[in-house]
Image: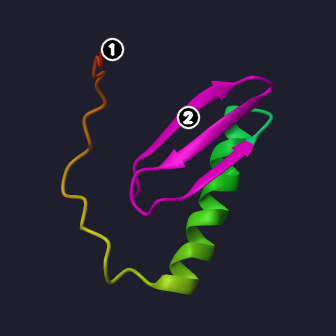
């Protein structure tokens, strides 16, 4: 299981995996997630899982406010 974030950016949905650092896109959320699944699979084929931390519980999604001077 891998944590992913999907955001609607313009005409595309962009899906990003937290770890491994993989990004993909699609015209729908489902397509973006399907493409991300394929991209993660390709990443793991190339780099393996040795450096990936084991996810023992779901990640927490929150917002961080940053002021720019």
Task: Tell me residue 50's x, y (percent).
Answer: 32, 84
- Secondary structure, mark 1, is loop
Mark number, residue 6 = 2
Q: Is residue 17 magenta?
A: yes
Total marks placed: 2
The residue carrying mark 1 is: 69
Q: How is the image coloured?
A: rainbow
Residue at 75% across / 23% down in the picture? 10
Q: Is residue 34 magenta?
A: no
- Secondary structure, mark 2, is strand
User: Extreme left residue here?
Assistant: 56
Residues rendered magenta in the picture: 1-25
Reply above or below: 56 against 69: below
Quarter holding the N terminus?
bottom left
Task: Tell me residue 65's x, y (percent).
Answer: 28, 17
User: Could you tell me if the residues under marks 2 and 1 are in contact, i.e. CB atoms within 8 Å?
Assistant: no
Q: State whether the magenta stretch is mostly helix, strand or loop.
A: strand
Left or right: 60 with respect to 38? left
Residue at 58% across / 29% down in the picture? 7
Residue at 56% across / 74% down in the picture? 43
Reply above or below: 67 against 1: above
User: Extreme front residue here?
Assistant: 69
**Distance from label 2 to label 1 (Cα)?**
29 Å
Reply above or below: 24 against 26: below
Residue at 25% across / 68% down in the picture? 53
Left or right: 45 with respect to 56? right
């Amino acid at each position: 299981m891998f944590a992913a974030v999907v955001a609607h950016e313009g005409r595309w949905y962009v899906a990003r995996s937290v770890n491994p650092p993989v990004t993909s896109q699609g015209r729908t959320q489902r397509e973006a997630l399907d493409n991300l699944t394929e991209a993660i699979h390709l990443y793991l084929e190339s780099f393996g899982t040795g450096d990936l931390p084991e996810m023992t519980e779901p990640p927490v999604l929150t917002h961080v406010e940053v002021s720019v001077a």
